[in-house]
Amino acid sequence: MSVEVTDEALEVLKRSLELGGVDRSSGGGIRVRGAHGLGGGFDVQIELAEGPLKGETVVEIKALRLFIDPRVTDAYPQAVVAVEPQHQTLVVRPAEGSQS
């Protein structure tokens, strides 16, 4: 799996960990979790986490630890975590040029 985090998203995620009281020095980080909707489609949720769950891939980017759900890896083998400018929300999307 290849994942990129934009600088803007990195700052939002680090600030969220601080505000949420998650201790990065003891293994805390961000969970990127996938879910299939009842009506079809695929949603990605970003959550604060104390550590990885079984089966998650741990990726470290610029001192930020991400716990990636295998369903996200399957849906987006090359992913980007970014801030969506219109609504200022975090999103996970395929990297430009990827086949996802």
Image (cartoon, helix red, strand yellow):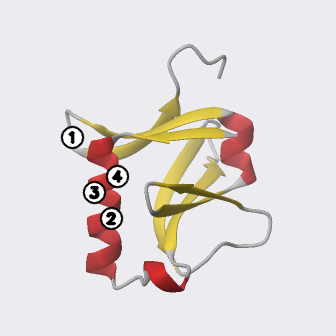
Query: Badges 3 and 2: C-beta atoms under 8 Å apart?
Result: yes
The amino acid at mark 2 is: Lys
Residue at (49% x, 33% y) in the render: 93
Q: Nearer the viewer, residue 50 or 27?
A: 27
Q: Earlier in the sequence, mark 1 or mark 2?
A: 2
Q: Which mark is residue 10?
A: 4
- Spatial CA distance of label 3 from label 2 is 6 Å
Q: Nearer the viewer, residue 8 or 61?
A: 61
The N terminus lies in quadrant: top right
Q: Position of residue 39 (x, y in %)?
A: 62, 40
Nearer to us of marks 1 and 4 is 4
Query: Which residue is tagged 3?
Result: 12
Q: Position of residue 64 (x, y in %)?
A: 45, 62
Q: Picture quarter containing residue 16?
A: bottom left
Query: Which residue is tagged 2?
Result: 14
Query: Badges 3 and 4: C-beta atoms under 8 Å apart?
Result: yes
Q: Position of residue 36 (x, y in %)?
A: 66, 47
The amino acid at mark 1 is: His
Answer above or below: position of 94 versus 19.
above
Q: Earlier in the sequence, mark 1 or mark 4?
A: 4
Q: Picture quarter containing residue 62?
A: bottom left
- Spatial CA distance of label 1 from label 2 is 19 Å
Q: Position of residue 10 (x, y in %)?
A: 34, 52
